Amino acid sequence: MSQSLGVIDVVWNGVTLAVEPGAKFMLGGLQNKTVAYGRGAARSQEFVPSTLEITTLLARGQRASDLYTTAEGELQIHCDTGQTIVAYAAWMTERPDFSGGDGGKVPLKWAFGEYEEIS
């Protein structure tokens, strides 16, 4: 039986983050867009950015301010199926909300354009 994607590990600016199950990423690039005209249709292309969404946790001794930055940085996505996606100029898109009583969950979101896939 072949293996399918199960665990995603994330390294942000050299720091490995704890990732809860349910992380998701979308690799961007050109995609077709349908353009309707009269009684026909055609296509044009548009660029869609890549995204990554994870939930991590705030641990004792960790600074909450370490989980968000406005600067660009290197983002690595490691899949347990062997793929590694590296974005050298990723950025965080939203300031995180911190929740107590449920393990200190913190949702983090990134966007990036070009990436390199290493298998």
Image (tube, helix red, strand yellow):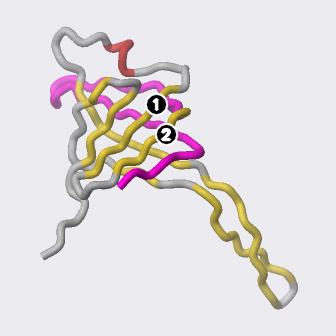
* 44 is higher (above) or lower (below) than 105: below
| Residue 30 image position (x, y, % from top left) | 64, 61
Q: In the rendered image, which quarter is residue 13 located in?
A: top left
| Residue 117 image position (x, y, % from top left) | 44, 52
Q: Which residue is the site of mark 2?
A: 87
Distance in Å between CA atoms under marks 2 and 1:
6 Å
x 37%, y 26%: residue: 97
Q: Which residue is the site of mark 1?
A: 74
| Residue 71 image position (x, y, % from top left) | 55, 20
Q: Which residues are magenta?
A: 90-119
x 19%, y 9%: residue: 61
Q: Secondary structure at mark 2?
A: strand
Q: Amino acid at mark 1?
A: Glu
Q: Residues within 10 Å of mark 1 (few under 14, many from 20)?
A: some
* 7 is higher (above) or lower (below) than 112: below
x 16%, y 13%: residue: 60
Q: Residues within 10 Å of mark 2 (few under 14, many from 20)?
A: many
- The quadrant in which the C terminus is found is bottom left
x 71%, y 60%: residue: 46
